[in-house]
Amino acid sequence: MQDWLTMTAADLGRGIARGEIDAEALCETYLAAIAAHPDADRIYARTTPERARAEAAAAAKRARLGLRVGPLDGVPVSWKDLFDTAGVATEAGSKLLEGRVPAQDAAVLSTASHAGTVCLGKTHMSELAFSGLGLNPTVATPPGLHDRGAVPGGSSSGAATSVSFGLAPIAIGSDTGGSVRIPAAWNDLVGLKTTAGRLSCAGTVPLVASFDTVGPLARSVEDAALMLAALEGGRAADLRGATLNGARFLVLDTYTEDAREAPRAAFNEAVAKIADAGGNVTHGTLPMVDEAMALAAVLFTPEAYGTWGDVIEAAPDKMFDRILERFRSGKDFSGPDVWKAWNTLNRCRAEYAAATAQYDAVLLPTAPILPPDAGRLMADQDYYVTENLLALRNTRVGNLMGLCGLSLPTGTPACGLMALAAPMAEARLLRIGAALEAVLA
């Protein structure tokens, strides 16, 4: 049963279907692993054992009767603590929301539950999801996978570590500027950023609703594909026969050449493997991306502060000062500033679509840096600002351009390769991802 803690969600589902794995025993195995783990309280904000056991019992009964409702029926899942859970606190990593107990589940949690998944509990996160580092001194900072003194990436920090430390086979996070893909990369996982609007954010604590997305952090591309289907109540992408032969890729040099040594070397090695496997790799730059990136502050922070300003200013002392400062920076922009930025962004998106139409995906390192040291981040504010902005720099390209994106492990610890594809092209991206995964493994 110990092997269950390292198996993919897809393999666990197949084991349940064959009668080799009992969903109730699987649930108990994960609950016991969480209870025994020395860092569990830094990873999980709270577990939901009663719900998990009830859902697992129902899944086990369906399996015995041959009535399973999907390939992940009976598979445990962890949920970032910004997805509402009926009758269970959802606090989004902030003391501002302490004691907040929603009356019903988030839409995606409800849909996934109808697909048979088992809710293990809620995972820690960056405060109100407004940091890519995963540092949260007001509530909890999960440990780094490769260095316990480093941050794990955020804002879906506990989501990633719940999987990387064997405390969940798959996790659900959110991604506004990179919050699924950064912790996936730093924890050697697959992270899927869905297109904004593809999955409902109803019942999800917002950050910047214009950019907020929902996505899985998983051990394989197949797991990500199956979980996307469970989240939207659809059919998973067919990954059979996925190949890189003839696939066309654009390497975005602007966001690759200045990456730090380890991420750059890992990325370049991965690109060489892709070319050797038959991928057609072109290098280039996209000026409209640079133009859009310069607008990030005016596009993100005013909406974030507009959403949370009243709550924040009622009790600003409850917040981590670095996050408070970032929210308050949204006051510096006027309505015309925001309107002009959106007009420019929409033009840039159209230009990007035209410039990349010939490619299957755009490639770049998921993060240009390795996980920073948590102690230094707390002690050195300049270092915090620099590393936080760099952590999210590459991933933000996907959010600004309105794309779907996939981060994959390169084989070098804490170094991910990111593939970005057109809006709503998740099925095609996942097929490319399956082929990339086979080459990079």
Image (cartoon, rainbow, N blue to C red):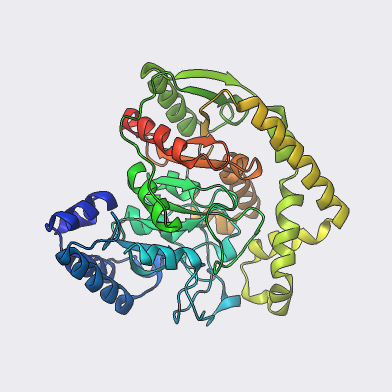
Q: How many marks?
A: 0
Residue 54 lies in what quarter of the image? Answer: bottom left
Residue 431 lies in what quarter of the image? Answer: top left
Residue 371 in the image: above or below residue 32: above
- Residue at the spot 74% in from the left edge and 75% down from the top edge: 310
Towards the viewer: 334 or 71: 71
**In the displayed structure, does residue 186 sit left or right of residue 325?**
left
Towards the viewer: 131 or 380: 131
- Quadrant of image for the C terminus: top left
**Does residue 15 show up?**
yes
Percent position of residue 95, x then y: 57, 76
Towards the viewer: 191 or 253: 191
**In the displayed structure, does residue 400 sit left or right of residue 32?**
right
**Does residue 415 show up?**
no
Percent position of residue 58, x then y: 25, 72
Residue 272 lies in what quarter of the image? Answer: top left
- As drawn, which residue projects farthest toward the left? 20
Percent position of residue 189, x then y: 38, 46
- Quadrant of image for the N terminus: bottom left
- Residue at the spot 75% in from the left edge and 44% down from the top edge: 295
Residue 136 in the image: above or below residue 242: below
Residue 117 in the image: above or below residue 414: below
- Residue at the spot 38% in from the left edge and 22% down from the top edge: 273
**In the displayed structure, does residue 167 sit left or right of residue 408?**
left
- Residue at the spot 74% in from the left edge and 41% down from the top edge: 346
Percent position of residue 34, x then y: 28, 67
